[in-house]
Image (spheres, helix red, strand yellow):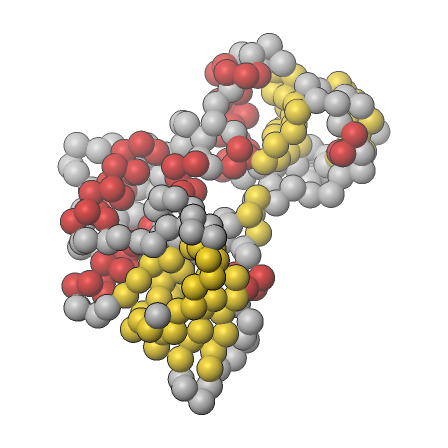
Amino acid sequence: MEEVVVIIGAGPAGLASSACLNRLDIPNVILEREDCYASLWRKKAYDRVKLHLAKQFCELPYMPYPPKLPMFVPKNDFISYLDNYASHFGINPRFHCYVESVYYIKNASRWCIVVRNNKLNTIEVYIAKFLVVATGENSEGLIPKVPGLDGFEGMYMHSSQYANGKDFIGKDVLVVGCGNSGMEIAYDLLYWGAHTSIVARSPVFPSIANIKGNEITFENGKSKQYDAIIFATGYRSTVLDWLKVTEY
């Protein structure tokens, strides 16, 4: 299939790119590996999350937020905004399209995108004059290597798997990482009645040295029993797994 522009990723950046191209009548197609757009927000964001910037700095092109929304837009309102955005600009991504490889054909001045359609169980090849990579930096949750983690007798997860604290009521939970997600999840756990600790890579809150059973030993030699660990330790971009060129 030959396209003018192929956009990889149907998150906010992919939707915005498609909307801008549609306004200029430039044909484009969005390839999305999930079964919906904005899958990170729909499937991997915890319930209480809000935009971390004021809404006027987070608008997509050509569509402001409804005036009634608060300054920091909650998750469900942001998803509704994206729904309206896709509908308004006639954006229809092709879902279940997992990109296996992308390379540039120099003699044809075209991009070749090899896709596995997980719904139809077929391989599809797209040829495009222009390529937009809109997959973001949050493709894959990153859990650090910790000695003994595989033998931890409690539950552990990445922050992208955390929705709310209702399963952790009364439990001792260790949150690893003190960025936005780590601090908000720790607060949410406290709200739900969990006993929460936070660990970060600093002298004040030392990182984990090793794990044995339910006991976690920190680099300062102190140890404590925990029922669960939540890793708010960021993500890894998967672009270089399938983008096979560094120059063109």
Q: Is residue 18 left or right of residue 124?
A: left
User: Of residues 22 and 71, which is closer to you in this image?
Assistant: 22
Residue extending farthest bottom:
107
- Say if 191 sits above or below 22 in the image: above
Which quadrant of the figure has residue 16?
Answer: bottom left
Seen at 54% across and 25% down, the residue is: 186
Query: Is residue 190 something that shows in the picture?
Result: no
- Say if 18 sits above or below 96 in the image: below
User: Of residues 72 and 159, which is closer to you in this image?
Assistant: 159
Q: Quadrant of the N terminus?
A: bottom left
Which quadrant of the figure has residue 154?
Answer: top right
Q: Is residue 130 left or right of residue 23?
A: right
Seen at 53% across and 33% down, the residue is: 161
- Say if 203 sits above or below 237 in the image: above
Seen at 68% across and 19% down, the residue is: 227
User: How many labels were placed on the picture?
Assistant: 0
User: Of residues 197 and 25, which is closer to you in this image?
Assistant: 25
**Whole-percent x and y of residue 222?**
81, 25
**Whole-percent x and y of residue 52?**
39, 40
Q: Is residue 24 left or right of residue 102?
A: left
Query: Is residue 77 something that shows in the picture?
Result: yes
**Whole-percent x and y of residue 238?**
55, 57
Seen at 61% across and 45% down, the residue is: 142
Which quadrant of the figure has residue 240?
Answer: bottom right
